[in-house]
Image: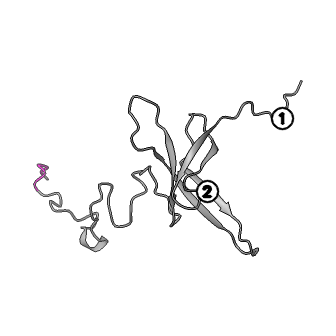
């Protein structure tokens, strides 16, 4: 017996308010993830009426101001006119060029001693010949 295809069960959605941009003041139903939260970024494609390249409106999820910590967080989408989305996860291996993991400047390759050269160069280690 095969399982029926295309049946996803009940799909949940929430009415989320939009702040700023062309959708300001509207509340639209948005599908929620398995954790019950709406997606972090909501992109709305807008076609060009003349048939050219359309634009994409970018909204970013943020908590509704004035919410209480003991209650579930209510979300809203805020408009980003520049379309840029900040990454919230900062992995240690995705550092900026010229900086170490702590954000400090890294020396240029010519400023560091070669692997065979060091400040002590092995003298005074207690080994006698």
Name the residue at 72% across, 31% down.
10
Name the residue at 57% across, 34% down.
36
Q: Residues under labels 2 and 1: Cα distance?
A: 28 Å
Kindly identify which residue carries mark 2.
43
Of the numbered discs in the image, which one, if any, rests on residue 124? none
Residue 105 appears left or right of 51: left
| Residue occupying the far top of the picture | 1
Instruction: State yes or no: residue 113 in magenta.
Output: no
State which region is magenta: 124-128
| Picture quadrant of residue 51 | bottom right
Residue 117 appears left or right of 27: left
Indicate whether 50 appears above or below 39.
below
Q: Residues within 10 Å of mark 2 (few under 14, many from 20)?
A: few
Residue 4 appears left or right of 68: right
Kindly identify which residue carries mark 1.
5
- Quarter holding the N terminus is top right
Q: Which of 122 and 60 is in front in this view?
A: 60
Instruction: State yes or no: residue 125 in magenta.
Output: yes
Is disc 1 placed on a helix, strand or loop? loop
């Amino acid at each position: 017996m095969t399982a029926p295809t295309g049946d996803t069960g009940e799909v949940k959605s929430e009415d989320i308010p939009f702040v700023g941009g062309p959708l300001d003041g509207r509340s639209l139903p948005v599908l929620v993830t398995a954790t019950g939260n709406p997606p972090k970024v909501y992109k709305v494609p807008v076609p060009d009426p003349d048939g050219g390249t359309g634009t994409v409106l970018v909204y970013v999820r943020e908590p509704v101001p004035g919410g209480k910590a003991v209650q579930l967080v209510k979300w809203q989408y805020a408009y980003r006119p520049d379309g840029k989305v900040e990454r919230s996860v900062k992995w240690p291996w995705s550092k900026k060029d010229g900086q170490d993991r702590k954000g400090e400047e890294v020396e240029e390759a010519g400023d560091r001693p070669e692997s065979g050269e060091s400040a002590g160069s092995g003298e005074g280690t207690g080994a006698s010949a």
